[in-house]
């Protein structure tokens, strides 16, 4: 049995579900940059299944994995119980997403949200797009480059995360068997990878159970080894909490006061500053230079 994040409430929210078949896994695939709600009864169900001998895999953010392990107690240490955490930047405000999506649907006179792809890779891994598929409106797909989507700028600009995310205590101590995420900064040539256009994932083994999982899928995947420091260079969120946006408090106060999303969008662009753009380019250049030394 696998537990993972699913879109629910017409795409306005994300919740955890449980599946025992490949078809059910399809809905759990894909990035979901939203807070996922977990029914406490689900933990009880997974615990009973594990005690009964079923294989259980729980996936989620580091804090959710820590919650899963805490809820199952000693049962989480059984050889048939596995956990996998995602590399987590932080969790944005559920209210902001609900109101942003409602605005988007209304702006295009749509009836239904058919699909949401936070990281559509039709143009390639490095040129991801945010795509919201609509029905009954003036367009089928609302598609924007990742860095051009306002909600994603607010999220990655660290203006709307949960307060605990700015001082996360679970980055390295969730107890997960594996940690997975995009392998940003991947050196394709150095690793002999000829076509990383659709993306490369980094998988960090934390436990012997994690190694067992990797060994069981090696024959059906393109895999190679990398130094942990290389993964960390492109994914500082593995160990570091984000710093709040300078205007975070003011922005969140406006949201809490009921300021319409279209007004927030006009007041807060969350465009990266010149210093942020320069710093990002310098970090990239330093990574490339370090590979040549």
Image (cartoon, helix red, strand yellow):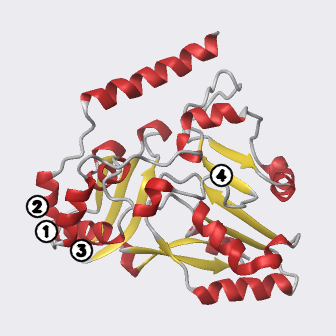
Q: Nearer the viewer, mark 2 or mark 3?
A: 2
Q: Are marks 2 and 1 in contact (CB under 8 Å)?
A: yes
Q: Nearer the viewer, mark 2 or mark 4?
A: 4
Whether residue 55 sits left or right of residue 158 in the image: it is: right
- Identify the residue position indicated by label 4 in the image: 172
Whether residue 90 is visible, yes or no, is: no
Inter-mark Cα distance, 3 to 1: 27 Å
Classify mark 3: helix, strand or loop: loop
- Identify the residue position indicated by label 3 in the image: 136
Quadrant of the drawing holding the N terminus: bottom right
Classify mark 4: helix, strand or loop: loop
Q: Is residue 155 above or below residue 202?
A: below
Inter-mark Cα distance, 3 to 4: 45 Å
Which of the two labelled residues, at mark 3 and mark 4, occupies the earlier sequence position? 3
Which of the two labelled residues, at mark 3 and mark 1, occupies the earlier sequence position? 3
Residue at position x 13%, y 68% from top? 259
Q: Position of residue 16 (x, y in %)?
A: 56, 76
Q: Camera-side residue: 220 or 57? A: 57
């Amino acid at each position: 049995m696998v537990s993972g994040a699913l879109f629910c409430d017409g795409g306005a929210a994300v919740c955890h579900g449980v599946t025992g078949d490949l078809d059910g896994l399809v809905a759990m695939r894909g990035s979901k940059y939203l807070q996922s709600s977990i029914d406490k009864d689900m933990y009880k169900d997974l615990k009973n299944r594990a005690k009964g001998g079923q294989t259980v895999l729980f996936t989620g953010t580091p804090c959710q994995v820590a919650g899963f392990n805490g809820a199952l107690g000693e049962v989480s240490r059984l050889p048939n119980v596995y956990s996998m955490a995602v590399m987590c930047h932080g969790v944005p405000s559920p209210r902001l997403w609900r109101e942003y999506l409602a605005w988007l649907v209304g702006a295009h006179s749509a009836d239904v949200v058919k699909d949401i792809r936070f990281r559509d890779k039709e143009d390639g891994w490095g040129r991801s797009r945010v795509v919201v598929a609509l029905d009954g409106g003036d367009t089928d797909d609302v598609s924007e480059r990742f860095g051009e989507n306002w909600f994603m700028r607010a999220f990655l600009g660290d203006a709307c995360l949960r307060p605990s995310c700015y001082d996360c205590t679970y980055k390295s101590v969730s107890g997960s068997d594996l940690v997975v995420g995009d392998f940003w900064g991947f050196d394709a040539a150095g690793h002999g990878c000829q076509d990383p256009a659709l993306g490369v994932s980094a998988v960090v083994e934390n436990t012997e159970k994690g190694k067992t999982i990797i060994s069981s899928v090696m024959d059906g995947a393109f895999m190679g080894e990398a130094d942990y420091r290389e993964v960390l260079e492109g994914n500082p969120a593995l160990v570091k909490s984000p710093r709040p946006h300078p205007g975070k408090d003011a922005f969140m106060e406006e949201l809490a006061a009921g300021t319409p999303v279209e007004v927030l969008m006009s007041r807060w662009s969350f465009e990266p500053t010149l210093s942020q753009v320069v710093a990002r380019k310098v970090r990239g250049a330093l990574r490339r230079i370090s590979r040549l030394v």
